[in-house]
């Protein structure tokens, strides 16, 4: 089984947007500290968030990266 890709998201309710590569949140226009972030699992080929470890686009199942 392929491993999911982990993507950093803002975790500061109500904002759960995907963070930029430099760790900044485009919608809040700030760079959250690590306590205000969480990792989401993504499909590495479709680049969309997985739903219960299944890609909603290609329907493949992934496992958490070790
Ligand atoms: Zn944000
Ligand atoms: Zn996919």
Image (tube, rainbow, N blue to C red):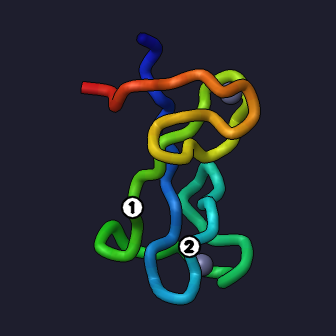
Residue located 70% across and 36% down the image:
47
Most distant residue in the bottom direction: 14
Q: Is residue 44 left or right of residue 7?
A: right
Q: On screen, 63 above or below 49?
A: above
- Which residue bears the numbered disc 2? 16
Q: Quarter for ligand 1? A: bottom right
Which numbered disc, 1 or 2, marks the residue that appears first in the sequence? 2
Q: Is mark 1 within 8 Å of ligand 1?
A: no
Q: Is residue 57 left or right of residue 10?
A: right
Image quarter (top left, top right, bottom left or bottom right) of the C terminus: top left
Q: Position of residue 62 (x, y in %)?
A: 46, 25
Q: How many numbered markers are drawn?
A: 2
Q: Are marks 1 and 2 in contact (CB under 8 Å)?
A: no
Q: On screen, 34 above or below 21?
A: below
Q: On screen, 28 above or below 64?
A: below
Most distant residue in the top direction: 1
Q: Position of residue 14 (x, y in %)?
A: 55, 88
Residue located 51% across and 70% down the image:
10
User: How dense is the environment of label 2, judged by Cα within 10 Å: few (below 14), some, or many (20 and up)?
Assistant: some
62 or 66, which is in the foreground? Answer: 62
1 or 26, which is in the foreground? Answer: 1
Q: Position of residue 63 (x, y in %)?
A: 37, 26
Dot 1 falls on a residue whose secondary structure is strand
Dot 2 falls on a residue whose secondary structure is loop
Q: Is mark 2 within 8 Å of ligand 1?
A: yes
Whole-angstrom CA distance, mark 1 to mark 2, is 9 Å
Q: Residue 21 got which mark?
A: none
Residue located 56% across and 42% down the image:
50
Image quarter (top left, top right, bottom left or bottom right) of the N terminus: top left
User: How dense is the environment of label 1, judged by Cα within 10 Å: few (below 14), some, or many (20 and up)?
Assistant: some
- Which residue bears the numbered disc 1? 38
């Amino acid at each position: 089984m392929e491993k999911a890709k982990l993507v950093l998201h803002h975790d500061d309710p109500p904002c759960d947007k995907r963070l930029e590569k430099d760790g900044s949140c485009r919608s809040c226009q700030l760079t959250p500290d690590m306590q205000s972030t969480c990792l989401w699992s993504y499909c590495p080929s479709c680049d969309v968030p997985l739903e219960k470890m299944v890609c909603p686009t290609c329907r493949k199942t992934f496992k958490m990266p070790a």
